[in-house]
Amino acid sequence: MDFSLDATSPTPPFEQVRAQVIAAIDDGSLIAGTRLPPVRALAADLNLAANTVARAYRELEEAGYVETRGRAGTIVRGGDKASSQAAQAARTYAETVRRLGIEPDDAMALVRAALGER
């Protein structure tokens, strides 16, 4: 796991960390059960505040990519193929609506409508 930051990127550091972890999970570099570096260790390696890495990990956990097991650390979650494909489709959709300038609430309304929900 070799994470790095692009200081010239307009993407916030926590988002760069989050995206790199997701990419590593998607390409198979990080498999289910792999322990991610501790927050403080990764923060020190990347010259970031620990809260920045903690935010990336928290968002990864909320999205279902990892789980935190207290002192055991943060572990890559396993998942089935359908969930993985749906997560990739969601990421692609999110990138598209951001690029189009669609507000998050409007994007979610479009998803609900496509699913037949109100």
Image (cartoon, rainbow, N blue to C red):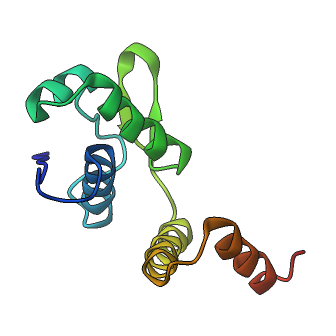
Q: Where is residue 104 in the image (x, y as percent from the top left)?
A: 62, 66
Q: Which of 101 and 45 is in front in this view?
A: 101
Compared with 101, 32 (above or below) is: above
Figure disc tally: 0
Compared with 111, 75 (above or below) is: above
Which residue does the image show at 11% across and 48% down from the upper left?
A: 4
Which residue does the image show at 55% across and 73% down from the upper left?
A: 86
Q: Is residue 54 left or right of residue 45?
A: right
Position of the C terminus by quadrant: bottom right
Q: In which quarter of the image is residue 112?
A: bottom right
Query: Residue lying furthest top in this view?
Result: 71
Q: Position of residue 16 (x, y in %)?
A: 26, 52
Q: In this view, does 101 lie to the left or right of 56?
A: right
Which residue does the image show at 41% across and 35% down from the upper left?
A: 55
Q: Nearer the viewer, residue 9 or 42?
A: 9
Q: Position of residue 49 (x, y in %)?
A: 24, 25
Q: In this view, does 104 lie to the left or right of 97?
A: right
Q: In this view, does 53 lie to the left or right of 59?
A: left
Q: In which quarter of the image is residue 72?
A: top left
Position of the N terminus by quadrant: top left
Compared with 70, 58 (above or below) is: below
Q: In which quarter of the image is residue 110?
A: bottom right
